Amino acid sequence: MKSFTRKCVFSHSLALFLLGPCLLLSCSKSDDQRTFEQEALRAPQNITETSGDPSDEGRTDSDDWRISPMYQGLIAIGQPYTRFPYPNPLHYNDRLILELYLRGVETLSGIEIHAVDSLRHISGPIASQNGLSSTSLVSFDISGSAIAGASGGDHSSGLYRILIFDSRQNIISYGDVRVQ
């Protein structure tokens, strides 16, 4: 009987030893997602210029509003489904309109938006939405004052990075805005 018990314990230990790393790897982020998130956490650099007029798109920054590998093909920001966040630049008292088009994202339960200043200080959520449906246009209306996180004046103007997270703290997208 002892021999049988030892074999069972050994079998279970061997199974856990061999399957453990596989289970951990399946739960972890891909290398592409980790690289994307490292790029997202850099200091803000340039902006994609937009106005309130959909026909008047200005200069674009190829680093802004890319979709993470985890959500590639499932979420869109920009043409042809939405507009890039506008206006950019915006004034402290203006409101930034940020639209995301969700297509077939059944596992996305919520979205949080954070701002990062040039010193790479991340704000608490400046906007969020829960209870998302699988195919929908999600729109956020964010004040310049919430992005700047300041009481106005000279301290509020500058370049900020907007980070869009899912409810599990994976970065979906990011882009830079200028508050004037």
Image (cartoon, helix red, strand yellow):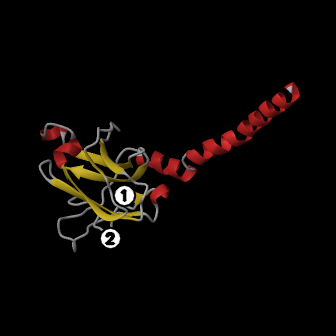
Identify whether 97 is placed above or below 54.
Answer: above
Across and down, in percent, residue 134 comes to 37, 62
Identify whether 102 is placed above or below 9.
Answer: below
Across and down, in percent, residue 38 comes to 47, 45
| 171 vs 132, nearest the viewer | 132
Task: Name the disc covering residue 36, or none.
Answer: none
Q: In this rendering, which labeled residue sits more in front, label 2 or label 1? A: 2
Q: How far apart are marks 2 and 1 (CA)?
A: 16 Å
Q: Which residue is disc 1 drawn over? A: 64
Residue visible at 42% across and 45% down?
Answer: 168
Quadrant location of the N terminus in the rendered image: top right
Q: What residue type is labelled 1?
A: Asp
Across and down, in percent, residue 57 comes to 25, 69
Q: Which residue is disc 2 drawn over? A: 81
Q: Which amino acid does label 2 sit on?
A: Tyr
| 102 vs 12, nearest the viewer | 12
Identify whether 180 is placed above or below 48.
Answer: above
Can see residue 157? no
Across and down, in percent, residue 180 comes to 17, 49
Q: In which quarter of the image is residue 83?
A: bottom left
Indicate the secondary structure of the residue bearing disc 2.
loop
Residue visible at 75% across and 33% down?
Answer: 13
Residue visible at 30% across and 56% down?
Answer: 47
Residue visible at 18% across and 37% down?
Answer: 150
Indicate the secondary structure of the residue bearing disc 1.
loop
* Neighbour tally class for label 1: few under 14, some 14-19, many 20 plus, Cα within 10 Å: many
